Image (cartoon, rainbow, N blue to C red):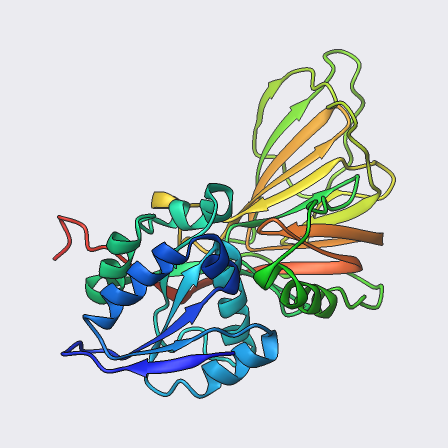
């Protein structure tokens, strides 16, 4: 790990710049531009942690400095997970300068972070903090955008990994993959004690009843859903706020959990899609529990597992992100 401190001519808040090693390798010019802009507007200290333990040490000794991530969505996720472990997630807003391939910056774009290095750096210096939700699991992991469980298991990226996708990713994935003791996976009631359902059944005239507990508020429409080629099923028990969405007797192809973006962000709920052969269920809830013989999942596209049970809970407004000030902002 390397670090250096650069005094600036001014700036109300000192910054801790956390450089993603993968970003330095893939786009060193964007990293340099972001460092120059930030160094010109604030007192900065630069660090390049290469392992989770190094990141923990840097963050625990940051003092009053605000953490600023220069890298991909995965780099931001690592920092948030470390802050969550240290119980410092809401202490200071986090800045982000996205650097990486377009597919590695999907969460940053969805959250409203400028993708240009200069604009993103200026948002860190002069932007406003916005409180956002976070998905936190009972294994200590966090997710910015969502979680996906597929019947065929997690998709392992090909090629030779590098940067934070090498040793760091393996260590953190192994930490989260600790199997939990099988048991009851029920969750408490949500803020309103209810789940909003939208159900699609198919094929027409031949679908049997889908067993579930809790009231179904509305059936949107009935249509035939053809399984995708090469899609596999898994036998999982899925509960949302204590309401049964799927059980082991009916195979599940995909369980998709996402945090809403835009105007719907910050409501403290997740959007859930459960796809089974011939059926699609949608729900909104504050927590979801999944149990099975052993399943893997992807958190923000990063493979984790296999595990035997996992519960995700929405932590409403638990962290802040520095974003550009809008024109109509006071």
Q: Is residue 280 visible?
A: yes
* Residue in the picture at 35% in, 55% down: 30
Measured from the top left, where is residue 215 in percent x and y? 63, 39
Using residue 274 as the reference point, say whether residue 152 is left or right of it: right
Q: Quadrant of residue 209?
A: top right
Q: Position of residue 287 (x, y in %)?
A: 60, 56
> Is 105 situated above or below 228?
below
Q: Position of residue 7 (x, y in %)?
A: 23, 82
Residue 292 visible at all: no
Residue at image location 77% in from the left, 37% down from the top: 252
289 or 218: nearer the eye?
289
Look at the image and tell me in which quarter the C terminus lies. Answer: bottom left
- All told, the count of numbered labels is 0
Q: Is residue 71 above or below residue 41?
A: above
In the rendered view, tell whether residue 222 sits above or below residue 182: above
Residue 262 figure quarter: top left
The single residue placed furthest to the top in the displayed view is 205
Question: Is 138 left, or right, of 229 in this rendering?
Answer: left
Residue that appears at 13% across and 49% down:
328
In-image side of 196 versus 167 (left or right)? left
């Amino acid at each position: 790990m390397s670090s250096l401190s650069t005094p600036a001519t001014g700036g109300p808040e000192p910054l801790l710049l956390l450089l993603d090693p993968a970003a330095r390798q893939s786009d060193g010019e964007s990293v340099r531009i972001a460092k120059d802009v930030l160094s010109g507007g604030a007192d900065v200290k630069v660090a390049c942690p290469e392992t989770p333990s190094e990141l923990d040490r840097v963050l625990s000794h940051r003092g009053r400095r605000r953490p600023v991530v220069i890298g991909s969505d995965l780099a931001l996720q690592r920092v948030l997970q470390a802050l969550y472990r240290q119980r410092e997630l809401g202490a200071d807003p986090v800045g982000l300068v996205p650097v990486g391939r377009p597919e590695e910056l999907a969460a940053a774009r969805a959250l409203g972070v400028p993708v240009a290095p200069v604009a993103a750096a200026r948002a860190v210096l002069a932007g406003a903090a916005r409180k956002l939700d976070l998905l936190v699991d009972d294994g200590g992991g966090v997710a910015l955008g969502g979680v996906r469980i597929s019947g065929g298991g997690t998709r392992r990226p090909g090629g030779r990994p590098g940067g934070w996708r090498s040793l760091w990713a393996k260590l953190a994935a192994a930490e989260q993959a600790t199997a939990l003791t099988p048991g009851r996976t029920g969750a408490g009631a949500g803020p309103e004690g209810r789940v909003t359902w939208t159900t699609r059944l198919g094929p027409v005239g031949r679908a049997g009843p889908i067993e579930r507990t809790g009231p179904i508020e509305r059936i949107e429409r009935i249509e035939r859903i053809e399984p995708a080629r090469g899609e596999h099923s898994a036998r999982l028990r899925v509960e949302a706020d204590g309401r049964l969405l799927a059980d082991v007797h009916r195979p599940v192809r995909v369980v998709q959990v996402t945090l809403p973006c835009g105007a719907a962000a910050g409501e403290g709920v997740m959007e859930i899609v459960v796809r089974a052969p011939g059926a699609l269920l949608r729900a909104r809830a504050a927590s979801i529990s999944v149990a099975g013989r052993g399943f893997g999942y992807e958190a923000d596209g990063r493979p984790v597992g296999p595990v035997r049970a996992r519960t995700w809970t929405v932590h409403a407004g638990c962290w802040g992100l520095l974003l550009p000030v809008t024109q109509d902002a006071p």
